[in-house]
Structures are given as C-alpha cells and as structure tokens.
Amino acid sequence: MSVLAGKELRIVGFLCNWCSYGGADTAGTARAVQPTDLRIIRVPCSGRVNPLFVLKALINGADGVLVSGCHPRDCHYSAGNYYARRRLELLKEFLPVIGINPDRFEYTWVSASEGQRWKDVVTNFTNRIHALGPAPRWEDVPARYDRPEELIESIRPLGCGEHPALPELKQAIKDALAEGLEGVLGWKMSFDAIHAEPVFMTTPEEVDSLIWGPFNVHNLAVYLPKYKGRKIGVVVKGCDSKGVVELLAENLISREEVKIFGMGCNGTVSLPRILAKLPEGAKIESCVGRGNKLTVTAGGQAYEMTMAEVAQDKCRLCTKPNAVLSDVFAGTPTTEPAAPADGRLPGLRFLDSLSLEERMGYWKGQMERCIACHACRGACPMCVCRDYCVAESRDPHWMTQEDSVREKLYFQTIHALHLAGRCTGCGECQRACPVGIPILALRQQIGRAVSQLFDGYKAGMDPEAVPPLLGYELEEKNIHEREWK
Ligand code: FES
C-alpha cells in the first residue's frame, strides 16, 4: 500500500496539452514541491472539456476536479477556451442544485512557462479540497422522498371554458389545407374525457376533431424536426411557440416550411392533480369545463374542481399565454401578466431551502423511482439528437446499463446540460415522467444561471438570437477570473 494511502484525495485534472500541461511540466522540471493528489488527463484544448467529463467524475466519487487551459487570447485553436469559459462557469452554477459543492470544481488558465503559477494553482486547489474533505458518497446520504405539494397562486386568471375563437381557428386550418399545406399538428380527445392526444390533421373532418382548452397539454413543437422538408402547420399555445422559435433559432426547422397557428391560452391541467381528486381506478365518463370550473363525472358521480386546484404550475406563472410567433392568430390575445417580482419557481424554491447534503438526498430519493424510460427525452422539443443520444451510445460509452441512482441522475444532468441556453421551460419533461419526478427543477436551475450570466437571456423568444453557449465574448461581463494567490 502506498505511504500516501488515506492522505490523498481523488482530484482529477483536465489539462490543455498546449499550455497547462506544459506549465505542469515546467513546475516539475523546476522541482517545485506540489501536492500529489491530482491525476492529470491531457486534452487537446480546454474547449475539448465537455462539462459532462467533470460531472461524471464528480458524480462517481471524485473529491475535486480542476480544468486548466491556455489564457484567453492564447488558445492554440483561437477560441476553444472562450467557449470552455462559458460552459464551465455555467456548470459551476449548476452543481449545487444536485447537492455537489461548487468549490469542488474549478477552472483556470496556466501557460507553459508559468511553472510557479501552476504550483500555486494545484497547491491552493488541493488545499481547498482537503479543507472540504472527501466528497459525500451517494450511498451514504440518507434519501429524502418529501416535497410538499405547493399550489402557487396564479399570476393570471385561468379558465377551462370553450374558446370562442375555435371555429375561426378551424376555418383557418381548413383554408390552409386547401391551399396546399400537407397537414397541421393539433390535439384531439383521446380514450377518455380528460386525456387528449396529438393529431396530424390532413382532412376537414380531422380538423373538426381539433380541441383547444385545458387538456392540450402536449408541446407539438417536438414533432416539427421530423417533418423537415415538408410544408406543414402546427397549432401552438404560448409555451409551445417558444419551442418553435428555438428550433428556428437553431436552424433545426425552416421558417418557410412551418405555418404557425396560435390562439390565446387560459391554462392547461395537471392530470395527476385531477386524478388525485377522483376515486382510484374510477372510470371517467365525461368532463365539462365552464368558466374556471371543471366537472368530471367518474364512476357515476360528479366531481367539481377549479382550475386553481388542478392547473399545471407552469400555467400559473405563464407570462406568454399567446404565441410568441404566429402566422395566423385566432380570436383576441389573452392578457399577458407581468412576471412575478419574486421569480417563483416552486421546485427551485424548495431546493434552495435545502442544504447541499439534503439536496443530494432529495435527488437520491427521486432517482430511486426513475425507471429510465426516457419519456422526458421523448417529450422534449429541444432534445433533437435522439438517434445519437449519449444515453445509448456505446462509443463513447457515456453511461452504463447499471440500475443505480448515479447513472440515472447522470442521465438527467446530461439532459439538463444539453438544454443549457436552449430550454424554453415548457415542462414537458416533467409532465411526461410516468413516476412524477420533478426534473424540471434541473432545467430551471440551468435557465436561471443562463439568465444571470448572460444578461437575462431567455430561450425561445427570438428566432434570430444566438444561444449563449454557441458564442462568446472576449471580455465576459459576468464571468471573472478567480485569484489563486
Ligand atoms: Fe489550450 Fe485551447 S489550446 S485552451
């Protein structure tokens, strides 16, 4: 056994070959005394460091991770470190939401001639990790299964009555089909009175089956990339339209090929909240919506509930009930409320109130229920590389088939990080989850960090906008180099 066994911690270093690796070499050549905890992985550029490398190391038990590249303006490939800076800063903001202390991760710049700086960096970082001690293990953290059901107050009136402009919308779709549109994506009622399903309408009869109201829960933007190259239409709520806008911003669909039909939205329901009000297993016979009240008849008995009781959280806080972008807008737009000043996001508010260890325990408890069905991925309009998803890739082998909390949480963090600066907050991932895991909070944390780092940027608002992680600034306004002395 090594004499250092028990004294060293597991620190992983990703070092750019052209500068920091040379800096470490310079320190070694000068015989500078340094801690020995760091295990170095040489990478061609800091831009090659996928934040998932760092996450994988930390989730799997590394006590600390250090990334070091060339100084800004010195990257061998011009801009690799500028891209890395944005991604790694965002990662640092993300780590606490899953209970990992952000101090366990750092990134910096060291040139090949800076042996002394390398010594300072590695010594200070190692001391910091020793002060924190070994990272808590997922196995040792007590799982938490609680999260109080919090019915946040709506910032706007919610309704479930028949929309007066529905005939106008149907007529506009029929006209568009007659003019040569191949089909239009919408919703129709499904196997009972509270479940709707997507429909691709190609005939006037199918258009007559179109519904609009509290059960239009699906975000139909998810289907658009599959129809690329075909001229089709899509009916959107305000939140769905942000998905369409983001797909346009990323050139995943073409504006000329998609006709957007919008109508003012008065909120949609959370089906689990409705089902919780009905006797278990009761057959649903009918559902009538009037004003803000739903009457569901199930098992021969009528149950009354208000939209305030059963609406989705995202609808309560929605400030964009009308399509952000549309070609046809039927009826009058719904009044847009101002954003709440306190930024109320129930999932995040709850997580913010927990300590880091409690957050780990919380996600451990949640992920124990995950059945890895990937429904969250299937429902996400911005999850567009399903055929090449890292969750299924065996080359590289990002994830194992192990049925463990770590692997399942790792998948969720991959999904959240892939959506950084792209997630429009439609909440489809959480709605589609068959076991009710509140995974939207992971996306919301990323969205909050993106907004703070990049001047209030919000995905899905402008088809011409460049998502923040696809660009960089030479001097970042809100990202500052940390001192190592
Ligand atoms: Fe060193 Fe890009 S080559 S950071």
Image (cartoon, grey):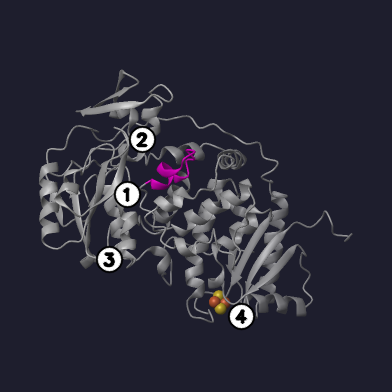
Q: Which residues are magenta?
A: 427-440
| Residue 345, magenta (yes or no) | no
Cα separation between marks 1 and 4: 46 Å
Decide: few, some or many residues near mark 3? Use Cα within 10 Å; few <14, some 14-19, many ≥20: few
> In the rendering, which numbered label is found on residue 18?
4
Badge 3 amino acid: Glu
Disc 4 residue lies near ligand 1 with CB under 8 A: yes
Cα separation between marks 4 and 2: 53 Å
Against 99, residue 142 (above or below) is above
Cα separation between marks 1 and 2: 14 Å
Tag 1 near tag 3, CB within 8 Å? no
Please, what secondary structure does the residue beneath circle 4 have? loop
Which residue matches tag 3? 464
Q: Earlier in the sequence, mark 3 or mark 4?
A: 4
Quadrant observed for ligand 1 in the rendered image: bottom right
**Quarter occupied by the C terminus:** bottom right
Q: Which label sits in the foreground, 1 or 3?
A: 1
Q: Which label sits in the foreground, 1 or 4?
A: 1
| Among the 4 quarters of the image, the one containing residue 20 | bottom right
Decide: few, some or many residues near mark 1? Use Cα within 10 Å; few <14, some 14-19, many ≥20: many
